[in-house]
Image (spheres, rainbow, N blue to C red):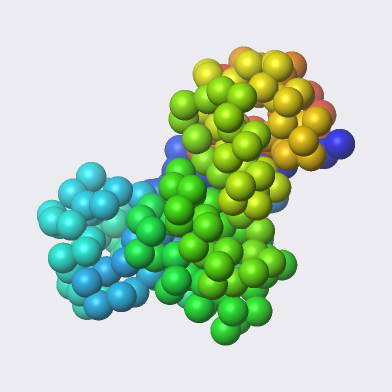
Amino acid sequence: MSFLTVGHRGVMGVEPENTLRSFVRAEREGLDQIELDLHLSKDGALVVMHDAKVDRTTDGSGAIADLTLAELRQLDAGLGERVPVFEEVLDAVATPIQAEIKDVAAARVLADVLRERRLLDRVTVLSFHDEALREVREYLPGVRTVLVAGRLGPEIVERAQDVGAHLVSLELRRIYLELVRQCHRAGIAVMAWTVNTAQELALARALGLDGAATDVPEIKHAVAAGKSMGPAT
């Protein structure tokens, strides 16, 4: 079975996270999929950013929900990059995308974009929020979903089945072998976040995981070569 490599917010270990520059770099480095995060701006744009506020990743301040897209466009997201919207990422790269809904309000807007652009085969929807995944599936039956979770236990299988998730994305340091086996017996694949070193990749493989999100291109290169790697930089 192949090991899926997912560029975490592009390749945020070497480029400004959740920027077009980072996504293009992830595609160039050969990552199998690209993960990004979505919030709604004040005027309803699908803004690509992890945090609910712009403070950490830009030279601005304030909540995304309180800023218009025009205001967000004025911010520097790192190395002169501007805050992108989801549609721009779709146009900038051809790599399959994992789109994480950071708030339930974005579910319907995202579903509308996926329907209009006929992207069910290219975009998978992720969320920590079960209700967000249920909502996007209600608006868009047939969409592929991934349940993301930090707290783990046997209930993960039931939660994933309840929201129709074919894959669960779990924190590497919390994953244990029996949980992986339970998921696999239920036909649910398991990936980890975040795998950035040789030791973490070795652990992911030992656990029998199906893939991992990574901040660095070296993980993809190691998987492609089928060998170990040096420490991530």
Residue 214 position by quadrant: top right
Residue 197: percent from the left, percent from the top? 57, 22
Residue 203: percent from the left, percent from the top? 66, 17
The residue at 65%/52% (across/down) is 164
- Residue sticking out furthest to the bottom: 116
Residue 44: percent from the left, percent from the top? 30, 75
Q: Is residue 124 left or right of residue 37?
A: right
- Residue sticking out furthest to the right: 1
Q: Is residue 125 left or right of residue 20?
A: right
Q: Is residue 231 left or right of residue 229?
A: left
**In the figure, 111 relative to 81: above or below?**
below
The residue at 55%/67% (across/down) is 138
Residue 6: percent from the left, percent from the top? 61, 45
The residue at 22%/54% (across/down) is 54
Residue 191 position by quadrant: top right
Of 101 and 5, the residue lying toward us = 101
Residue 148 visible in the shown view: yes
Residue 81 position by quadrant: bottom left
**In the figure, 185 relative to 78: above or below?**
above
- Residue sticking out furthest to the left: 61
Quadrant of image for the N terminus: top right
Residue 34 visible in the shown view: no
